[in-house]
Image: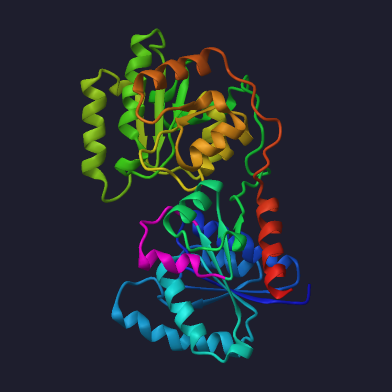
Amino acid sequence: MRRLTVVQLLPALHSGGVERSTLEVARALVAAGHRAIVVSAGGRLVQPLLDSGAEHLTLDIGRKSLLTLRHVASLRRLFTETDADIVHARSRLPAWLGWYALKGMPAASRPHWLTTMHGLNSPGRYSGIMVSGERVICVSQTVREYLLANYPATDPAKLRVIPRGVDVSQFPRVARTDRRPRLEVARHYPQLAGAGPLLLLPGRGTRLKGHAHAIQLLATLHQQGEDNAVLWMPGAREPGREAYVSELEQLAQRLGVAGGVALTEPTSRIAQAYAASDLVLQVSDKPEAFGRTVVEALSVGRPVLGWKHGGVGELLTQLQPAGAVTLGDEAALARTALSLLRHPPALPSRIPFTLQAMQRATLDVYGELIG
């Protein structure tokens, strides 16, 4: 493939799956000898992006304001001056701005247009911009099916399913018998000390992540013989979430398990958190587009328990079916948790959803567009 200039558009570079995927693809482009440019409002991930050899243009293209429309001209100028080959939009408002910028360019010099559906956005005209690409990347089969169900006029031939990938070197397999990660975690969070099983639910402090299901599950496990089990929920305690955290603490108190629940700030050592756990929970009430937690936990070698819907259900069905439970069936959730704790299942020896596979497949789509 000749040297390409690829411009990726997204709201900001703070944190999250969209941001990580943007950096990962930019890094792969640079490594393959291409020019990678990212346009966003900036954030803490700008420096890692620049360190990879990619470029960044600061434009606040994610702010929902009429003033944001002024950036259409700036984007058009960028596409022209850099002789961009491909514009890759990863979010709705940046996609609208990019689309309008391209429409104002002569057809002969217009870059190719690509979009990625990272989430299960509410259907409608505003979200419909994400199916406008010459190619549309879906981060899971779940997203592809959702897209076709809600935008039936979409040509299925332009859709490409490219699951998000995990860097297995960052999530190495750790033997279940290795207690060092648990001891290290207990050093920081004393309530997690002891020999009882550790349940882990990583995720932001939002009701949709299902923290209450996890606390109820812990209480049920205590009633059914696993009275030493403890629960760690890193990421639940965040600024602005104090009322929600207080609600969860009151629930744990009411159910008699407050002493075995740790609601903490996000951890920068998530791989160690997986390794310290005996069972990883993914009980979001809202279906996830992909479910990176499932892949990360299985890469480390820890079983996952989750609702069988969305991307999480898709991954569990493929990689660890014993952990998939019908959405909302709390009794089945407890039965399955006991089974997974007392009889740990065989886990896949190889994770197919790797970072390298995602990068390679994305660059292949760029190659398709260029021909």
Across and down, in percent, residue 104 comes to 49, 89
Outermost right residue: 1
Between 55 and 286, the residue placed more toward the observer is 286
The residue at 44%/69% (across/down) is 129
Q: Quadrant of residue 34?
A: bottom right
Across and down, in percent, residue 355 comes to 65, 51
Between 289 and 221, the residue placed more toward the observer is 289
Across and down, in percent, residue 216 comes to 31, 23
The answer to whether residue 41 is seen in the rendering is no
Outermost front residue: 153
Quadrant position of the C terminus in the picture: bottom right
Q: Is residue 28 left or right of residue 131?
A: right
Q: Is residue 150 left or right of residue 102?
A: left
Q: Is residue 90 above or below residue 99?
A: above
Q: Is residue 222 above or below residue 293?
A: above
Residue range of the region highlighted in magenta in the rendering: 118-133
Quadrant position of the N terminus in the picture: bottom right
